[in-house]
Amino acid sequence: MAPFIQAGDILTVTGSAEGYDIGEIAAFVFPSDKRKLIVHRIVSKRNGMYLLKGDNIPARDGFIPEDNMLGKVARVERDGREILFGAGRMKRTIALLSRWNILQVLLFILRLFPRFVKEKIKMRGRLYGRSC
């Protein structure tokens, strides 16, 4: 679920009596293996089943029955502070981008951007005889 949720983050998961919405991050277990807890984003729903997918992986988890949904992530804490985790007003947009694997491409480009800017600054410094 990186970059929104990272290894070592503390998650607060709450039950959901009213069901789940597209874009929410939910904890669930696969029908075939109830020993493994997974936390992924809901990218679609149909007939009481939810299609879930990690934000930073291409594969979808498939449609999961509501009985296998354990709750939704209500809070993410990192280093003792609450962080934003893509569950606000943008959650549906993030879900759509994730569902079609566009989010993965955007995250890759954003990770490259700081390196690109740093290289441009270094090149400009060499052109004008400054050290960076």
Image: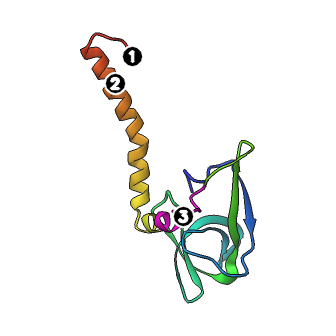
Q: Closest to the observer: 80 or 1? A: 80
Q: Which residue is drawn at 39% across and 33% down?
A: 115
How many numbered discs, if any?
Answer: 3
User: In the shown orientation, is residue 113 left or right of residue 42?
Assistant: left
Q: Residue at x 40, y 53 (%)?
A: 106
Question: In the rendered structure, which amino acid carries the disc numbered 3?
Answer: Arg
Question: In the rendered structure, which amino acid carries the disc numbered 2?
Answer: Ile
Q: How far apart are marks 3 and 2 (CA)?
A: 35 Å
Choose the circle earlier in sequence order: 1 or 2: 2
| Residue that mark 1 sits on | 132
| Residue that mark 2 sits on | 121
Q: How far apart are marks 1 and 2 (CA)?
A: 7 Å
Which quadrant would the N terminus be assigned to in this image? bottom right
Q: Is disc 1 surrounded by few (<14), some (14 to 19) or many (20+) residues within 10 Å?
A: few
User: In the shown orientation, is residue 112 left or right of residue 14?
Assistant: left
x then y, percent, for residue 47: 56, 89
In this rendering, which labeled residue sits more in front, label 3 or label 2? 3
x then y, percent, for residue 72: 68, 69
x then y, percent, for residue 43: 51, 72
Q: Is disc 2 surrounded by few (<14), some (14 to 19) or many (20+) residues within 10 Å?
A: some
The boundaries of the magenta stretch are 85-95
Residue 89 disc label: 3
User: In the shown orientation, is residue 108 left or right of residue 9?
Assistant: left
Choose the circle earlier in sequence order: 3 or 2: 3
User: In the shown orientation, is residue 64 left or right of residue 9?
Assistant: left
Which quadrant would the C terminus be assigned to in this image? top left
Look at the numbered disc 2 and give the secondary structure of its residue: helix
